[in-house]
Image: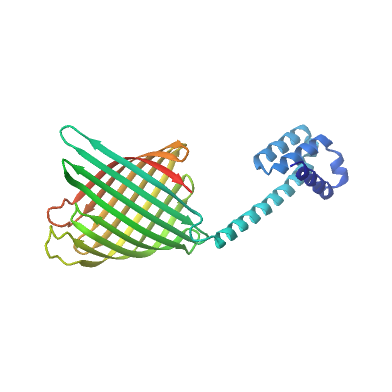
Amino acid sequence: MKRTAALSTAFLALALPAAAQAKLPEPVLKMIAAAEATGDEEQVAAVYAAAEAAYPQEVETLAVRKARFDGLAEKRAEIVELREKEAIRKAGLFEYWKGRGELGAIRATGNSDDLGLTAALGLERVGIDWRHKVAAQADYQRSDGDTTRERFLLSYEPNFNIADNSFIFGLGQAERDRIQGYSSRFSISGGLGHRFFDREDLSFQVKAGPAWRTSKIRDDVEPGSDRESYFAGLAAMDFAWQFAPTLKFTQNASAFVQSGNDTYTSLTGIEAEMGSGLSARLSYRILHDTSPPDDSVKTDTLSRITLIYDFQ
């Protein structure tokens, strides 16, 4: 750091007129150079503010020097950004992924004997133009010896930026929900999306497009039933808001609209960070089919209390 500070001082000494340099005491110049060597913009601004307060007659000289530092800092930031993009371009298939695992369990005894498990895994890779999302979820519950919930879902979504905040996407999804009457259901869709906000503390995006779905009803619900396929439309939104340092509100919703049976899903959650990558999450999901198989309810709800671990 001392060598960097010396080089910075020498460079700026050559850049500024000798007469101007002479008006600032050597200790002040060393203090400024040391702050600049750290690269911390807040610290540099504070040192310059102190120097201007102590030597108001040298405000112009200090402003010229600060402008040169800001220009060099901007160039350094551009170089760092270019290096990061180049590293992403050269990265392997399994690099630059981040994700989160979610796990919760339910156990009740007494008037009823209930045992339930909910688990989820989400992975995301953000590149220069591409984003890839992989999600898996499982809900299973038994009550008094009978299976009362059995749902599994797997999805993959790639999207490609076509403008600063707009993208095209594809979505492949496979699910199994025996309690709702489906032994399998597959969906493929694609379309356009737009990100209204894409910040660490606030994100909001919507997407829509055509879709194709194929479903197979359980044989014990409709014996001998054939697989049914439909063209549909998909609309979805994802919202996340970090409204406090350790608290986040999330809302995800989607709608598959098709002839015969529409599917609407809503997932609302509150997350509380606990440190070391761990969070606790309380969520409530609503799944509604307008025309489900016989003996199945139209609306299925699920409350979860889970533990989440974020990893990279």
For image coordinates 22% across by 63% down, the residue present is: 215
Does residue 221 appear left or right of residue 198 in this picture?
left
Does residue 140 appear left or right of residue 165 in this picture?
left
**In the image, residue 23 lies at what x, y percent?**
85, 38
**In the image, residue 190 lies at what x, y percent?**
36, 65
Quarter-wise, where is residue 18 in the image? Answer: top right
Quarter-wise, where is residue 249 in the image? Answer: top left
In the image, 125 versus 297, the foreground residue is 125
Is residue 237 visible in the rendered image? The answer is yes
Does residue 120 appear left or right of residue 222 in this picture?
right
Does residue 38 appear left or right of residue 147 in this picture?
right
**In the image, residue 42 lies at what x, y percent?**
65, 39
Quarter-wise, where is residue 220 in the image? Answer: bottom left
Q: How is the image coloured?
A: rainbow
Is residue 60 visible in the rendered image? The answer is no
For image coordinates 14% across by 60% down, the residue present is: 219
**In the image, residue 183 lies at what x, y percent?**
21, 58
In the image, 188 versus 260, the foreground residue is 188
| Above or below: residue 80 compared with residue 53 | below
Q: Quadrant of the N terminus?
A: top right
